[in-house]
Amino acid sequence: MKKIVALFLALAVIGGMVFAGGQQESSAAGDDQFEIVMVVKLEGVAWFDNMRLGIEKFNAEHPDVNCYQIGADTADPAAQVALINDLVAKGVDAILVVPNDPESLVPVFKKANDAGILTFTHEASNQKQISFDVEAFDNDAYGRHMADVMAEWMGKEGVWQPFVGHLTSPTHNQWVDGEVAQVADKYPNLKMATDRVEDQENQQIAYEKSLELLKTYPEIKALMGSAMSTAPGAAAAIEEKGLIGKVAAFGTCLPSVAGDYLVSGAAQSIHFWVPADAGYVTAMAAYKTLKGEEIVDGTDMGATGYHNITVEKNEHGNSIIYGQAWVDVNKDNLDEWKDADGKYKL
């Protein structure tokens, strides 16, 4: 049950839709809190385990907030929508989502907004019906950067193959769009094996599809992932086929998930942003909006890579926050991501 504080949320016309935050009644209790909830793609994976740390940090630092994270046990858009419907019925103040399928959220987000609940996303720069989306960086630039790293290892020639977690995932496809564009612009001797492959953010599926690709296209030299599942799944296939040094995995992943493959050489480079920081910033966006504070170019959102953000509008007229928060890890700097006891920091 949300605990409410008196304020009027300004009427905002976003993407042709009007969002009205209702008047909230004050309470004499000293522990009144905004209830802000992060709904992730799925629970039980390292990426979103780390994101929870940022949500918990935000909660600890803001006594006027009850902020927490939930998620389904499967990356199913319907399961995510069901969780959001529950939060709407509960009457929370703000719902934050890392979408499995942005389009599936539009009706439930409208339902939330009509009830006076603010909605926010991370990794959904084309989202409708939101106050803000948070992006760790410009997605085209990130994809182009990963293509450069891959191309250098390939000697700027050969066959490569991109993966996405879901064909409906906006950021994954934007990264691949950037990769494809960079290859077209700078590397005429690089060729893509086939259309982008979907691994459903499942490492076993990434492994199985990598084996199929390596059999069908034996000339492949690089497998490029977007979901955290791809690099370790592809690297396992590369190891199994005895192709280390001839084929390598690249893409978005965490050191704790792909570190052993960087050491073996089955993966050459991984790229990511710190999920905890992204979760923290998305919660901060909700908090500032609930308090009526402006979020504009140069706003400090309180986390590394987001101290000097830029804000742009997407095609629907909704506001997108961009940080500068990508990280590169390879065999040479892998130890920087380990604690003194050898355990991975992330």
Image: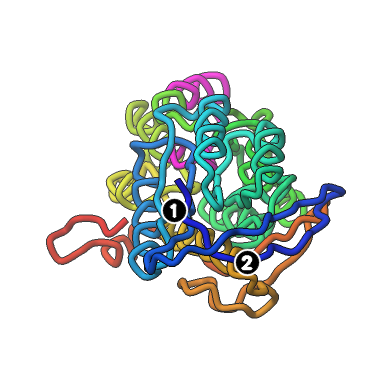
Specify start and end residues of the magenta stretch as a single range: 208-231
Q: Could you tell me the amino acid type at mark 2? A: Leu
Q: Is residue 167 above or below residue 120?
A: above
Report x, y in % for residue 296.
69, 74
Specify whether 318 is left or right of 35. Answer: right
> Is 153 part of what is drawn in magenta?
no
Report x, y in % for residue 22.
68, 55
- Mark 2–mark 1 Cα distance, whole angstroms, equals 48 Å
| Quarter holding residue 276 | bottom left
- Display colour scheme: rainbow
The structure residue drawn at horizontal position 48% and vertical position 32%, both measured from the top left corner, is 201
- Image quarter where the C terminus lies is bottom left
Callout 2 environment at 10 Å: few (<14), some (14 to 19), or many (20+)? Answer: some
Q: Which residue is mark 2?
A: 7
Is residue 299 visible to us here?
A: yes
Specify whether 206 is left or right of 159. Answer: left
Q: Which residue is mark 1?
A: 269
The structure residue drawn at horizontal position 64% and vertical position 42%, both measured from the top left corner, is 112
Report x, y in % for residue 87.
51, 39
